[in-house]
Amino acid sequence: MKISRYRLTFISILILVIFMVNGSFAATVELTTGKLPDKLKEGEQVDFTIKIKNYEGGKQLVLDTNLIPTAADKPLWNFGESESVIDANRYQQKITLNLSSLPAFLNVRVSGKVPEGIDKIKCDDTVLNKMHDTKLKFYEVRTEDQLVGIESFELIIGAKENFENSLQKIRRTELDGIKQEVSKVFYIGLTTEAQNIANEMTKMTWPDSLTLFGVINIKSSLVLNIIIILTAIVMFIFGYVLGSRDPDARFDEEEN
């Protein structure tokens, strides 16, 4: 079966268009130096280099990070030999590069530190501590509207970590309800107040046992609860019986 010249031309053009569409946004990004931990604390410094290539088909390259500059004179983004053709504020977390002026590949060194995880918001005479999202980005690279690569980490907020450690030290099941309420207070922004309450709760102690009549040693909390309940019932009955007696009858008994 012979294929006509027009049909062959159409198929060739179609294959060329498909190839151009698939290859136009085939940009890639890879880590070349440094390490990207899964978790980082507030204020920790990070330094790594990524290599971006195969972005010829696009018009713009967008770089984004949640890291912040380590100092006023130290930019987040460093492009080495390519900095002469970079027209962007290298101190900003998100920058856009014009691909027409870039070389075939780009080595980008990212130097920054992890931001604080809490914003202080003043409401009248009260200061609320609003916590940030703990899922942050080392970097995000996009070409046009296509995601090229992204690497994230979990932010460890010191105040939150200390509070949760304090709650874990409170092991009495009787305080579980109070712990839940204190946790609510913490996460609405009253972090200092909630931490103070948690600290006081960790200092609360109860005897592990009870000695009755100086002889009987009771260690079971269930038995202690039963004894307390039975004692309350007996005292109630005793008081009720005494209170229900006829006053005149008691007076006659005293005269006799």
Image (spheres, rainbow, N blue to C red):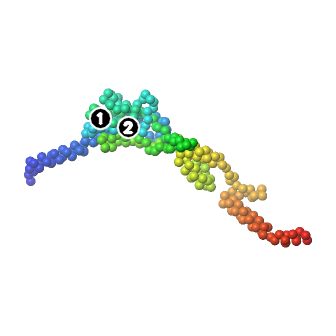
The kind of secondary structure element at disc 2 is strand
User: Residue 138, image x and y in percent?
Assistant: 41, 39
Mark 2 in CB contact with mark 1 (< 8 angstroms): no
The kind of secondary structure element at disc 1 is strand
Which residue is tagged 1?
98
Q: Amino acid at mark 1?
A: Asn
User: Residue 63, image x and y in percent?
Assistant: 35, 38
Examine the image and state in which quarter residue 87 appears: top left
Q: Single out the residue that lies furthest toward the front.
A: 124
- The residue shown at (35%, 42%) is 149
- The residue shown at (36%, 36%) is 95
Let me know if residue 202 appears in the view.
no
Question: Alpha-carbon neighbours of circle 1 within 10 Å: few (<14), some, or many (≥20)?
Answer: some
Image quadrant holding the C terminus, namely: bottom right
Examine the image and state in which quarter residue 110 appears: top left
Which residue is tagged 2?
94
Question: Alpha-carbon neighbours of circle 2 within 10 Å: few (<14), some, or many (≥20)?
Answer: some
